[in-house]
Amino acid sequence: MVDRLSTLDTSFLHLEDATTPMHVGSVMVFDVPKGGFDYDRLVALIAERIAHVPRYRQRIKEVPGGVGNPVWVDDAGFDMTYHVRRSALPRPGSDEQLEELIARIQPRPLDRSRPLWEVYLVEGLADHRFAIITKTHHSLIDGIHAVDIGNVLVDGNPTSRGGVMASWRPRPEPSGPELVVGAVVDAVRTPSQVVETVKHGIKDVTTTAGNIARVAGGVLSTLARVSARPAPDSPLNATVGRARRFVMVGTDLDDYKGIRAALSSADSEVDVSIHDVVLATLAGAFRTWLLTRGEAVHPGTTVRAMVPVSVHGGGGDLPTGTSMTACFVDLPVGEPSPLIRLRQISYSMTQQMAADSAVPAEALASLGGFAPPTMHALGARLGGMVSRRLYNVVVTNVPGPQSPLYAAGARMVSTYPVTPLSRGQALSIGLTSYDGGVYYGLYADRDAMPDADVLGRGIVDALGELADLRLRA
């Protein structure tokens, strides 16, 4: 029996074009271990790990005549060295040079005649570091059979011991007539497949250590609440070209915790979460960015963020049936007071989440393995479902583990998500907390946002503003 793509996954293939490739990525920075780390070691690590995720050896095959959705078939000519590539930075190997390399690698479409993923080893970073850049297509990360490639590369084991290599033989590829017959049979069995997909949206499930995150019907109720309010006009909504910029911003998780604790205890009217502090930080950064551009900023100026949030209806640990829903937050960038911005954002988030129960950051961070890349992918998929007329920017914030992770003995020191741009969206923002840090990845259209670095510096400054409030509280 063939494994057929869902209608939503198929739509990602049809919607993809040269300016909006439908893949997500991550940038992981490592310290070089004592024994060194090279291309051969990375290839061996990936070969060992994808043995448990067969999707990474499969490619997409179209059904003749388009009478059914495409299917996944084993790639008989699978070539690991095609997917795992090597690059290096010239001296001095700065973060700015790494950002430029990422901006050039990430927009390139994946080869549809092969499994839809790539990994790059980037050597020559300053301070005896190296980076791993990943790219995984949306249609591959269905959450059931495959998670983001970044998830399978790291674990909590600080040793570089190798695993047992599993043998693999590709299954015979179905013929054209077999694919047509299979599509007809599936259509008879599930005649309402397309209608159900449109009605209920996407059912994405990530099986990291048995914990599941699913996009469910909560999205529809959220859309019903906001559909009558289009997003405000913003330079963040622009025609998207092929070229990109990428900015990495590293901050300290203790700053967010301190702001939350100080302001919540000092003012009973403010019961903020770390997520609220993140959004308030972004509001301040957008304010600085707009003023630097000479844009008109008045008291009512806002930037609407679409924020995927994990929710569940019960207590205890993260249960099967956890959902992702969309919150739409008007960031009050026209408000000069950082405290008032934080209050307004906290109130807005509390109101939208009143009917559900947000998954605590600790629950997400405790997911087995390294869940953030897949969670960012699910958030980006959710953003792809929603009309861009409803928001200016997507912000995916996924708490990660607060203990070190390793790839074949190399310690990961930071990680930055790369979430794709939709049509008309000049910027996407992903952030992940990991091992005491909060790491932002700003992915922007190169022409629409040549000043993406200004927004990056604005994040650091806005967080400093909120930290000053903590000291005065």
Image: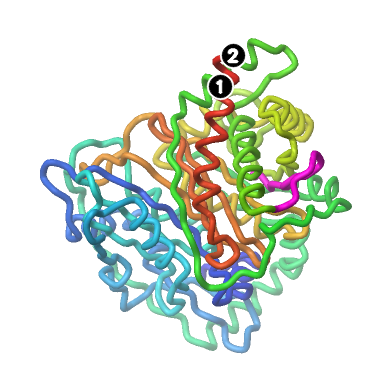
Residue 44 x, y percent position in the rendering: 21, 57
Kind of residue sitting beneath label 1: Asp
The answer to which image quadrant residue 142 occupies is bottom right
| Label 2 crowd bin: few (<14), some (14–19), many (20+), radius 10 Å | few
Instruction: Specify whether residue 316 is in view.
Output: yes
Kind of residue sitting beneath label 2: Arg
In magenta, the rendered stretch is 295-308
Q: In front here: 370 or 437?
A: 437
Which residue occupies 52% across, 19% down? 258
Q: In front here: 74 or 387?
A: 387
The answer to which image quadrant residue 191 occupies is bottom right
Number of the label disc, if any, that sits on residue 472:
2
Q: Is residue 130 above or below residue 341?
A: below
Q: Is disc 1 placed on a helix, strand or loop?
A: helix
Q: Is disc 2 placed on a helix, strand or loop?
A: helix
Residue 334 x, y percent position in the rendering: 74, 40
Q: CA distance from mark 2 to mark 1?
A: 6 Å
Residue 165 x, y percent position in the rendering: 21, 56
Which residue occupies 51% across, 52% down? 442
Instruction: Specify whether residue 321 is in view.
Output: no
Q: Is residue 322 above or below residue 113?
A: above
Q: In front here: 138 or 75?
A: 138
In screen coordinates, is 317 left or right of 272? left
306 in magenta = yes
Q: Are marks 2 and 1 in contact (CB under 8 Å)?
A: yes
Residue 336 x, y percent position in the rendering: 71, 33
Q: Which residue is mark 1?
A: 468
Q: Quadrant of the C terminus?
A: top right
